[in-house]
């Protein structure tokens, strides 16, 4: 009983701090009233998603309720309160969830790849698996970019929308002073919650070292088993940490969804509607190619079985916009719920988080040509061929975290002669598209694990 009392008290202190900071300075009755209302709202959200829902619903349903509640809550608060309150203060819970979820991703990638390679055993088999994996990833990414280029040429989302060039200046000049909540999200939390092991290493470097060490341990036979057992235990420990963090998933998803609604704004979404439709249509087509064509034809797994098993993955991927943060859920669903071989999945899926970015490649191809159309720049066939090659190449090694693909646009824009400041035109709706393309990214990874498991004769019933 005393433990529950301390927990409620802690939640109340967090709500009181954030609510008071959001209305600071408290120098008037209106400010005090606003702070009190926000404290009550934050405390109610904490209790609902950290106490009430976990006692009554399974985690997938909690996440679904949080997604719906975030949409409704974000819309309601923006009508009767300041949208900055959602972004700067309620958004703290979303940032906290993502940081905690990603803090062990690099070590998890390292040990899961290593365990997968060591578990395969025969190094010659490893080379065969690696070749199949690379061919699959490059093939599906190429298909995604071809879909993107086809839709952009058909729909031409940027033609006649030159007025967007003038809209982004106001957004760039806003927020001259950061609020307390914004500083907590950008400065305080990332400083405290940071992985000290391999913190700034590229995932490609980590995967390369894991491949070498796993292959070496596999060749040692019995002598390498003690080390393999240690890494197996570490793998389980990192997954256990992820499961603890998933306790925060409902409130994190709620905050992330509410922030999306508050930040996009209906007018801006309408202005960029055709662009969003082009990206979403391309993602939907590629998603169908992966789940309804490649999965049943090559992996011989029915789309119904695949989609039913991937529901938890889709929910986490859509809400976090991070294929890296979704990796533990993807590993569990692909192996336990659908039937991929665990060793093969441990090899393919972590590589897919870095190398296989179908949705990202499709997105940057559409976005770059859209920006070129807005600026009235014609991109001929040779230029679009350059977009194809660049999008496929830059998607390899993209960090599987929210917003990572925005940085890739500059490379493609330079290749076609479009101004770099055009990136600001698409930033406003990037969050919605980021969530959607993350779903496609994890789908491509999972289908790859199933296909390679089938070709190795290791696919089993879930």
Image (cartoon, rainbow, N blue to C red):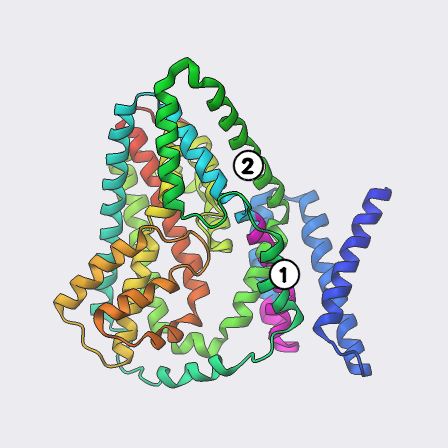
Residue lying at the far top of the rendered structure: 222
Report if the CB atoms under discs 1 and 2 are less than 8 Å apart. no
Closer to us: mark 1 or mark 2?
1
Image quarter where the C terminus lies is top left
Question: In the image, what residue occupies the spot 52% across and 43% down?
Answer: 197
Q: Most prominent secondary structure in the magenta stretch?
A: helix
Give coordinates of residue 46: x percent, y percent: 71, 56
Q: Which residues fall within the magenta stretch?
A: 74-100
Instruction: Identify which residue, 220 or 63, lies in the foreground.
Output: 220
Q: Which mark is residue 188?
A: 1
Q: Secondary structure at mark 2?
A: helix
- Identify the secondary structure beneath mark 1: helix
In this rendering, the answer to whether 51 lies above or below 431 is above
Name the quarter where the N terminus is drawn.
top right
In the depicted view, which residue is nearer to us: 218 or 16? 218
Whether 425 is drawn above or below 440: the answer is below
Mark count: 2
Q: Earlier in the sequence, mark 1 or mark 2?
A: 1
> Where does residue 129 sit, x and y in percent of width and height?
28, 31
Measured in 3D between alpha carbons, the distance from the residue under mark 1 to the one under mark 2, in whole angstroms, is 24 Å
Where residue 459 appears, as percent x and y from the top left, is 34, 27
Indicate the quadrant where residue 191 lies: bottom right
Relative image position of residue 256 (x, y in whole percent): 56, 60
Using a 10 Å C-alpha cutoff, classify the residue at mark 1 as few (fewer than 14 neighbours), some (14 to 19) or many (20 or more).
few
The answer, for residue 301, to whether it is visible in the render is no
Quadrant of the rendered image containing residue 11: bottom right
Disc assigned to residue 238 = 2
- Quick one: label 2, few (<14), some, or many (20+) residues within 10 Å? many
Q: Residue at x 52, y 48 (%)?
A: 102
Image point 34% across, 67% down: which residue?
277
């Amino acid at each position: 009983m005393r433990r529950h009392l301390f927990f409620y008290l802690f939640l109340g202190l967090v709500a009181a701090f954030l609510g008071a900071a959001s209305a600071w300075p408290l120098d008037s009755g209106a400010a005090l009233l606003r702070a009190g209302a926000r404290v009550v709202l934050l405390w109610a959200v904490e209790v609902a998603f950290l106490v009430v829902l976990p006692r009554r619903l399974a985690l997938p349903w909690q996440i679904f309720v949080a997604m719906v509640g975030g949409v409704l809550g974000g819309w309601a608060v923006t009508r009767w309160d300041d949208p900055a309150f959602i972004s700067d203060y309620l958004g703290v819970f979303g940032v906290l969830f993502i940081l905690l979820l990603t803090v062990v991703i690099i070590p998890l990638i390292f040990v899961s790849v290593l365990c997968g390679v060591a578990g395969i055993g025969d190094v010659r088999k490893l080379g065969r698996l690696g070749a199949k994996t690379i061919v699959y990833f490059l093939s599906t990414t190429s298909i995604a970019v071809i879909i993107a280029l086809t839709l952009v040429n058909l729909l031409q989302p940027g033609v006649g929308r030159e007025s967007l060039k003038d809209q982004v200046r106001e957004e760039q000049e806003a927020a001259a002073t950061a609020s307390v909540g914004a500083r907590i999200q950008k400065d305080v939390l990332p400083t405290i919650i940071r992985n000290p092991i391999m913190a700034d290493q590229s995932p490609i470097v980590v995967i390369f070292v894991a491949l070498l060490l796993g292959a070496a341990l596999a060749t040692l036979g019995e002598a390498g088993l003690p080390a393999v057992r240690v890494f197996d235990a570490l793998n389980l420990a990192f997954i256990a940490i992820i499961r603890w963090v998933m306790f925060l998933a409902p409130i994190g998803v709620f905050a992330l969804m509410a922030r999306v609604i508050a930040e996009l704004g209906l007018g801006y979404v309408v202005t960029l509607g055709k662009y969003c439709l082009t990206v979403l249509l391309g993602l939907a087509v590629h998603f169908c190619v992966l789940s309804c064509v490649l999965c049943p034809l090559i992996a011989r797994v029915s789309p119904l079985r695949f989609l039913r098993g991937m529901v938890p993955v889709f929910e986490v991927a859509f809400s976090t916009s991070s294929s890296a943060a979704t990796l533990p859920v993807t590993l569990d669903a692909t192996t336990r719920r659908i039937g991929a071989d665990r060793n093969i999945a441990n090899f393919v899926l972590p590589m897919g988080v870095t190398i296989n970015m179908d949705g990202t490649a499709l997105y940057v191809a559409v976005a770059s040509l859209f920006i070129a159309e807005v600026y009235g720049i014609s991109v001929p066939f040779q230029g679009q061929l350059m977009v194809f090659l660049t999008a496929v190449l830059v998607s390899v090694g993209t960090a599987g975290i929210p917003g990572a693909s925005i940085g890739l646009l500059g490379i493609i824009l330079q290749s076609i002669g479009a101004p770099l400041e055009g990136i600001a035109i698409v930033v406003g709706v990037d969050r919605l598209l980021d969530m959607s393309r993350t779903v496609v990214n994890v789908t491509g990874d999972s289908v790859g694990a199933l296909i390679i498991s089938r070709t190795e004769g290791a696919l089993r019933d879930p």
